[in-house]
Amino acid sequence: MKAADYRQMSDEQLELSLKEVVKNLFHLRFQSATDRLETPSEINKAKREVARIRTVIRERQLGVRGQKPTVQPAAAQPAVPQGAK
């Protein structure tokens, strides 16, 4: 699923999805340890899914989504501090 799909979910749905993906990741790691894993790339895909979900949850906690970052112009900052030569 894409991050945009996760952003449309409610908080409860996100938590459920996170638990499901973490559980799947555990099973994939277990299969890898016992040499039963057919596609090793599934572990990386699951890790990325966990990261996507946690990113969306963190964005909501911070309230960052939809806001533009504030950057100070370079001219407003002095290049050399006063009195230092």
Image: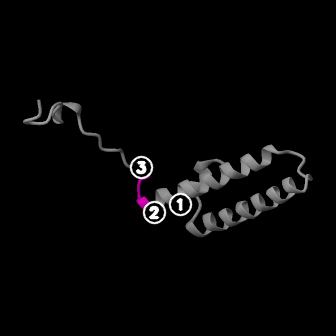
Mark 1 is surrounded, within 10 Å at the Cα level, by few (under 14), some (14 to 19) or many (20 or more) other residues, namely some
Residue highlighted by disc 1: 57
Q: What residue occupies the far right of the structure in this picture?
A: 36
Above or below residue 80? Residue 38 is below
Mark 2 is surrounded, within 10 Å at the Cα level, by few (under 14), some (14 to 19) or many (20 or more) other residues, namely few
Which residue is located at x 91 percent, y 52 percent?
Answer: 35
Q: What residue occupies the far left of the structure in this picture?
A: 83
Give the secondary structure at mark 2.
Answer: helix
Give the secondary structure at mark 1.
Answer: helix
> How far is mark 1 from mark 2, CA to CA?
6 Å
- Name the spot of residue 4 as percent of width and height, x first: 58, 49
Q: What residue occupies the far bottom of the structure in this picture?
A: 12
Tell me the amino acid under the disc marked 1. Answer: Ile
Residue 61 circle label = 2
Q: Are marks 1 and 2 in contact (CB under 8 Å)?
A: yes
Which residue is located at x 67 percent, y 52 percent?
Answer: 49
- Name the spot of residue 56 as percent of width and height, x first: 54, 55
Above or below residue 41? Residue 31 is below
- Name the spot of residue 61 as percent of width and height, x first: 45, 63
Q: Is residue 56 left or right of residue 24?
A: left
Q: Is residue 76 left or right of residue 69?
A: left
Tell me the amino acid under the disc marked 3. Answer: Gly
Residue highlighted by disc 3: 66
Quadrant of the image occupied by residue 84: top left
Camera-near label (3 vs 1) is: 1
Say which quadrant the C terminus sits in.
Answer: top left
> How far is mark 3 from mark 2, CA to CA?
13 Å
Mark 3 is surrounded, within 10 Å at the Cα level, by few (under 14), some (14 to 19) or many (20 or more) other residues, namely few
Above or below residue 8? Residue 77 is above
Q: Report the magenta residues as a range.
A: 62-66
Tell me the amino acid under the disc marked 2. Answer: Gln
